[in-house]
Amino acid sequence: MNKTFKMGFLSVAIATGLAGCSSLQSDAAQQGKVDALASQLNISYDVETNHGAQEGMTCQDMGAEWASCNKILMTVVNDGEAVSGNDWKIYLHSIRVILDVENKDFAIEHITGDLYVMTPTASFDGFAAGETIEIPLIQEYWTLFETDFMPRAYVTAGNAIPKAIASLNTENVDAYVTEIEGKNWKRTPEDNNILATAASRYAKNSDVAALAKGAIEASIIPTPLKTKQMRGALHIASGFEVTNNALDADQLAAFEKRAELLGVNVEGDIALNINVDAKAFEGKEAVSGAYKLAVNAGGVEVIGFDSVGAFYGLQSMLALMDNGDDEMLPWVAIEDAPRFEYRGVMVDVARNFHSKEAMLRTIEQMAAYKLNKLHLHLTDDEGWRLEIPGLPELTDVGSNRCHDLSETSCLLPQLGSGPSTDNFGSGYFSKADYMEILRHAKARGIEVIPEIDMPAHSRAAVVSMEARYKKYAEQGDLAKAEEFRLMDPQDTSNVTTVQFYDKRSFINPCMDSSMNFVNKVITEVKAMHDAAGMPLNTWHFGGDEAKNIKLNAGFQDTNATDQVAWKGNIDLSQQDKPFAKSPMCQKLIEEGVVSDFGHLPSFFAEKVSGAVAEQGIENFQAWQDGLKYSKDASAFKTENTRVNFWDVLYWGGDASAYDWAAKGYDLIVSNPDYVYMDMPYEVDPKERGYYWATRATDTRKMFGFAPENLPQNAETSVDRDGNGFNGKGTVEHNEGFHGLSAQLWSETVRTDEQYEYMVFPRVIAAAERAWHKADWELDYQVGKQFNQETSHVNKDAQLQDWTRFANVMGQREMAKLDASGINYRIPVPGAIMQDGKLHMNISMPGLPMQYSVDGGQSWMDYVAPVALDNNANVEVRALSADKQREGRAVSL
């Protein structure tokens, strides 16, 4: 019996060992296949058409919103040896809904967000050596800019470690995207935008004269209320002797750091007196940030309304500096005060993470141009970016993206982050990082506003708290597991969010545990602010886009009898509003606490405002659509309720903004068609960015924005298709506009270098509009209509103002950005051949320009029109002010 047992045990052991060896061999084979495919497959994309419906494609029947679809050709070349079999998968990113794949050998399935998986079908038996395979993909809407194509598709097979496909593992979009050609840069065949070319840029820049240095020596950015220039200049080579009666040690150190950067000696003998005297200011100039600056033979005197005003006065003194001649300041007398109390920049670090160092550099530039609110979008579906003591899962899971289909160790990859955590898709600010950002900002007069987005755009939080629930439930501690749970497990609502996530994108507003979570996060963030010496004065709730996009107007029911040709056909009976099938939320509806499921986000906002008020936080802030079902500002418990107003002007935002102001909200103008910095700089497929609101926003457009008289902008700009629109004031209310904020969303912005390219220099135009109301900005007037045919705006004055601003930027400020290490966008110059000569210009006169006649092999400086062979292969480019970086080169 004992012998039999031993023999049986031995047999099992041998069998188990053999199975283990087989498994190891299988795993090794799978890994070899993954490694081969990742290294050998050369994948590229080409836009075949952006006008699918017009070319006979069945966009409507495929369920495309607004019956609009395009065709992309995905080409796969096996650059190595043959790889047999079909036991592998490729995960790829697509910001457009993939509706169909026109190749019988492959199937594509949506996973979540922008993540899809492509699997070979039974008819596919492998890649032959050197084989080329074409896979046409039908997608919703259009693909107009090359950065729509996301990098870092990756391969998996069984238990093998996933690998990014090498040909797509790059930030060089040109490596895998064929240039968008023909009419495919147009959204529709009727698109009236002007494609940015060397010739069209030349025409656009032709009205901007290059000004003499003396004409702008007393001009600074942002423009002061009053500037008087006297004859004379102060020689400052010997440096300043600072007498400081206004700034604390940190403020003084911040000024000295900026002065040193610009080559200004603060240990000299020229008088620089800094004082605070609130009584020296009257009326509208008696506000925080106001200052007076005098530069004359006796030295420099700065008087601030408060310490922030004194700090700004010093920034204005430094703004007079010319890096080319930094030993002289013109004699001036400046009196100045801010237009808006709120002058903001919003940075999305959630979709893709941006480093602490990038934020510190941004803060320094904000201070130089008198911006005073840094709104950090810290959380979204794609990431949670702030350490919260007591909730480690938020950063252990929610700050990382990797290939884990269970999402218990990380979120799934999104937005081109690929299968690993070693890039921009992962990362967070530790407590120490965040407090360093707070202190850096405080020293420069900047309030940091944390945004924890809810109830929508909350997938990172929801998934993290589900991982927490699972951990404690497995330990048998259900009370702890449930404490901060954010999802009703019985909610079966079928929902698709704006960026294609399901119900796990939403924090359930009907659960007590959701408020436990809110209170915990507010408490911990407030503690960080207190410890850093910057009290938490504003809580940003987020609140935007809590909806099911399948219920949008661009869809119609497949069984409807009154169908139209321009809507996508779907089964609307299968679609739900968020939370509609949550028993907890159904109970609130039944009890009459809330009248409709669509009202739950505003109901939740009101509840959260109570928690914010209980913590002594003065301001509650949100994106305006999150509060649309609340009665007015009185529904909220905080002293002030702010809204970032982000309606598109040509879709009615020119009028609806005034409704929000009339309801008592402090309105922060944040319109995407003018002050979203994630929109492309120009109508050129080579530029980066989303373009749902506008095809382009360059520095000049942002400079020309009229934030208080929104209808005026209809006279000076066009809609996203390049067409005019009507703007008309309809609401008898023009108060309540408290600020302006420029936004940078990060869906296509992955690296710090890309971030700075998108923000600078155009954010400086936003700073100009937030600080200074131009003479060409008209007062809001009910009933006054603006469009491309009206002539209410003094466009000559606007051009003169822009010419001054552009010359100060090109001749002075860009060099300061260089000195600060900012990777700003170098404008692409305009150029034409005329009468056998090359003529070039640039949007910011003063920046160096070059041309090449040999395909970019060698470059020559452009100074004046130069005779060239008409058949020459001419390319043009601009350089950074310090000539250390080259801008994008284009051909004539």
Image: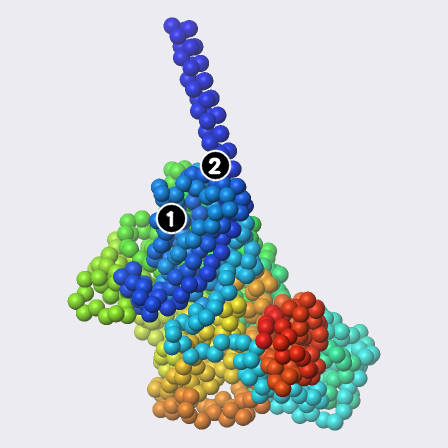
Where residue 392 appears, as percent x and y from the top left, is 49, 48
Q: In which quarter of the image is the N terminus?
A: top left
Q: Tell me what residue is drawn at x 56 percent, y 80 percent.
A: 199
**What residue is at 55 percent from the left and 89 percent from the top?**
799
- Looking at the picture, tell me which residue is in the foreground, 33 or 865: 865
| Residue that label 1 marks | 106
Q: Which residue is drawn at 34% across and 75% down?
A: 632
- Residue 242 falls left or right of residue 871: right
State the residue in front, 554 or 707: 554
Q: Is mark 1 on a helix, strand or loop?
A: strand
Q: Which mark is residue 30?
A: 2
Name the quadrant of the C terminus: bottom right
**Which SS class for mark 2?**
helix
Along the horizontal axis of the image, is 28 left or right of 590? right
> Looking at the picture, does residue 760 appear above or below residue 221?
above
Name, please, the residue furthest toward the left.
561
* Dot 2 amino acid type: Gln
Q: Residue at x 47, y 36 (%)?
A: 30
